[in-house]
Amino acid sequence: MGIFIRIAWRNLWRNYSRSLIMIGGIGVGLFGLLVYYGISNGFINQLVEVSIELELGHVQVTRRGYYQHPVQSNSFTPANSLMERIESVHGVRAAAGRLSAAVLVNSAEKSNRVDLVGIDPEREGRVTSIRNMIAQGEYLGPGQDGKIVIGRKLAEHLGVGLGDKLVVMTQDSENELQSRLFRVGGIFETNSPLWEKTAAFITLRSMRKLLGRPLQLTAILVRAEREKSLEPIVAGIDSLVTGEGSALEVFEWKEVSPLLAQSIEMFDFFVWVFYLIIYLAMAFGVVNIMLMVVLDRTRELGVMRAIGTTPGQVMTMVLLEAALLGVAGIIVGGGAAWLLNGYLAANGLDLGRWADGMEFMGLGSVIYPRIEPLEWLVSFLSAEAAVIVSSIWPAWRSAGIEPVRAIQFE
Amino acid sequence: MILFKLAWRNNWRHRWRSGLTAAAVVFGLSITIWGFCFTEGSHEQIIRNSVESFTGHVQVHRKGFHDDPSLRKVFYPDSQFVPELEGGVPGLANYSFRISTFGLASVGETSFAAMIVGIQPEREQEFIHWDRKIEQGRYLHPGDINGALVGADLAENLGIGIGDTVIIVTQDYYGSLCGALRVVRGTVRSHARELDRGGLLISLASAREMLSMQGMANTAVVMATGSEQVPQLISELDNRLGAGGLEVIGWRRIMPDIVQAVELDNVFGILTNLILLLVIGFTVLNTFLMSVMERIREFGIMRSLGASPGRVVGLIVVEAALLVGLGFVLANIVGIGASVYNSVHPLDFSEMGGDELSKFYGMDPRIYTRLTWQTLVYPNLFVAVVILLALIYPAWRAARISPAEAVSRRH
C-alpha cells in the first residue's frame, strides 16, 4: 500500500499546474460553502437566542391551549410550591412565572400595541437575560410596582425617556377597561428590533393587580442547565403537573414557536441543496481532471499491468491520487474559511446598511457566524467523499486498460 | 474560416474533456438562471402582495405624517385633494381615503391591540379587490357603518368569529378616550403581514364618527396604472399637492424594510451563485490550460509556419467560444425551460411545512418563478466574465510560445 501512496503523491506533482487548478476548484467550493454556512447559521442562532433568552426560555409550562389562544383568560393558578418542585427536576437551573397580556401603551402624544409581561424580577433574572440588556436606568427591583421597563425602539417611538409617564390600557378579568400610570424605570436594548418595539415589563404583582388576577400566571419559563437534552426535563415537569390532574401542558421552545422551527428546517434544506450543487459542480472538475490523468498515462499504466500490478491496485492508485488532491483542496479552502469565519465571529458581520430589511426578518443588523467543531468535520469529510466518489469512474476506466494495447498507445 | 474548422476538430480530439466542460457550463448557468428567476418571483410576490393588497403604489399624507405619524396630522380630501386632481393625472388609476390609528379591541373576554383602518368600501373594492381576500364571512356592504373585518391570523389567534361584537377603545382626534361597538362581518387574508396579524377594518364613515374626524382623512392610497408609472406619478402628484402641505410617498419609502430585505436577499443570492460559477470556472480553466500545454509543439509549428501569436490566441479563443457557446445555448434552453415550467407550476412550500414561514413573510406558500430580461442577462453575463477570466492565463501562455523552443521540445 505504501508504495501506491508514494506513487500517487509523486504523480500529483508531475503536472503541478493541473493539480493546483484542481486544488483551487475544490478549495474555492469548500470555502464558499463554509462561509455561507457560517453566516446562515449565525442568522439562525440569533433568532434562536433571542427567542430562548428573552421570550420562551428552554421549556414552558402553560395552561392547555394557551399557545393556540394566547390571551390572559387562558391563565392558571399554580399549585403551592410548584416553582420549587419544577426547580428540583434534574437538569433544571431555574424557573420563573409570567403573566402576559396584549395592552395599549399611551404616552402624552402616541400609543402603541405592546405585549406587557408581569415578571418576578428576582426569578426572571435567573431564567432570561432581560436583566443584562438594560442600557439605561435599571432593571425592576422587588417592590418597584410603579415602574415599567421598555425597549429602546418603543421608547423612541413613544417619545419617552427615563422617568416619563406611560398609561397602560387593558381589560381586566371582569372585562372592565383598566388604565394605570407607570413611570419608565429602565430601557433595554437587544439584537431583536421587533422585540424592542413590542415587549415591556412590569412586576408580576402590579400586573396581577392591573388584570385583577391575584394569583394567576400565563406561563412558567424554565431554564435548563444544558440546552441540548430537553426531553427528560419536559417529561420530568410533565409528570409533576399532570400528577395533579391539572389542565397544564409542558413544551420545549421548538414546539411553541413553529415559525422558528420552520426557519431552521428551511435553513437546513437550503444548506443541503447548496452543498449538493457545489459538490456536483466540483464533480465535473474532478472527473475531467482524473480522466486526463488516466488518459495521459495509458502507456505507463499498461506497463504496470504488464509487470503484474492488478487492476484493483491500479484503481486504488488513481483513487489515492484524487484523495490526496481532495485533502490538499480541503486544507486550502477549509483553512481560508477558518480564518475568515474566525475573524467575522469575533468582530461580527455588520449589515447595518440593510438594518430595516434585517428587522423585517426579525433580526438585528450584526451577524456573528458560527460553525461547530462537528460541522467543520462533517464538511471536510463530505467534501473528501465527494472527490473520491467523483473519481470512481475514471479510476474504473484505468483498471480496464489492456496491457498489450496500452503499451502500443502513443 | 480555417480557424473555425481547426477549432472544431480540436474540440473533437478530446470528446470527453470537451463534453464535460460544456456540461459543467450547462449545469452552472442553468441553475443560476433558474435561481435568479426563483428569487425574482418570490420577491415580486412579497412586494406585490403588500402593494396590491394594502399599501398601494403611492400614499399621500399631511407633510410630516410619514416620519412621525399622529392622529392630529390630517387633511381634508374634499378641499385639499380632490380639486387638485381635476382634469386627470397621467398614470393614475384610482385612489381612496383612509384613517388609520391604533386602539384596543375586545371580543368577549379577549382584548387585543389592533391597527384600526377606516376604508371606503366601494372605492377600495375597485382596486384592492377586498372581496377576493375574504377568508370567512363577507365584505362590508355599502353604508354598513356597524360592520368590521378582522385580519385572518388575528382572528385565528384570538378565536374571533363572524357575528362577534367588537368593542373598540381608542383616543379620538382631540385626545380623549372614545369607544364604539362593531360587528365582525368577515376575516381577511391579504398576505400583507401587518394587516393579517393585527388589522381591524371598518368603514371610513364609521371611523370618522368614532374619532370625531368629520371630513378628515390621514392617508390617501393611490394606485398607478402600472408599477412602471409610479415614479412619474409621484412627481406629478407632488407638483399638484405639495404646495397644499401634502406629502407624496412611493411604495419604496412606505416599506423600506421589505425593499431592503429583498436587496439583501439578492446580495446573498448573487454571492452563492458566484461561488458555484467560480467552481465551474476552475474546470474551464483546467480544460483550456491542458489543451494549450499538450499542444505546445503544435503551436510552435504553427508559429514557425508564419502564424502570428495573435492567430494562435485566436485559435484558442475560437475553440473556447465554440465549446462554451454550445454550453450557453443548452444552459439557456434548460434554465429558461425550467423557469417557464415553474412559472406555471409553482413550487409549493406548504408541502414542506413552510406555511408559518411564508405567512411571516407575507407570502403565498406557492412560489412562481419569474423570467425577466434581468434574470436572463445577469447570469449569462456572470458566466461569460468567469469564463473570460479562466481563458486569460491559457491564452497568454499560448501567445508566449517561442517557435524554436517549442518545436525542439519533446512531448
Image: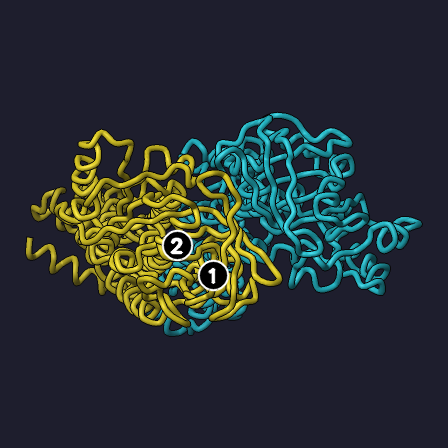
Chain colours: A yellow, B cyan
| Quarter the N terminus of chain B occupies | bottom right
The image position of residue B133, as x and y in percent, is 63, 32
| Quarter the C terminus of chain B occupies | bottom left
Q: Nearer the viewer, residue B48 or A315?
A: B48
Question: Mark 2 belongs to which amino acid?
Answer: Ser
The image position of residue A157, as x and y in percent, is 56, 62
Please give left or right for residue A180 compared with residue B166 in the image. left
Taking the spot 31% from the left edge, 48% from the top edge, the residue there is A287
Q: Do labels 2 and 1 touch, CB within 8 Å?
A: yes
Quadrant in the rendering for residue A15: bottom left
* Subunit ID for the residue under disc 1: A
Q: Nearer the viewer, residue A306 or A10?
A: A10
Taking the spot 9% from the left edge, 47% from the top edge, the residue there is A309
Q: Which mark is residue A182?
A: 1
The image position of residue B409, as x and y in percent, is 32, 69
Helix, strand or loop at mark 1: strand
Instruction: Please name the residue that numbered disc 2 is placed on.
Output: A206
Q: In this rendering, is residue A242 above or below B234?
A: above
- Report the number of discs: 2
Please give left or right for residue B75 compared with residue B167 in the image. right
Question: Mark 1 belongs to which amino acid?
Answer: Phe
Within 10 angstroms of label 2, few (less than 14), some, or many (20 or more) residues? some
Quadrant in the rendering for residue B238: bottom right
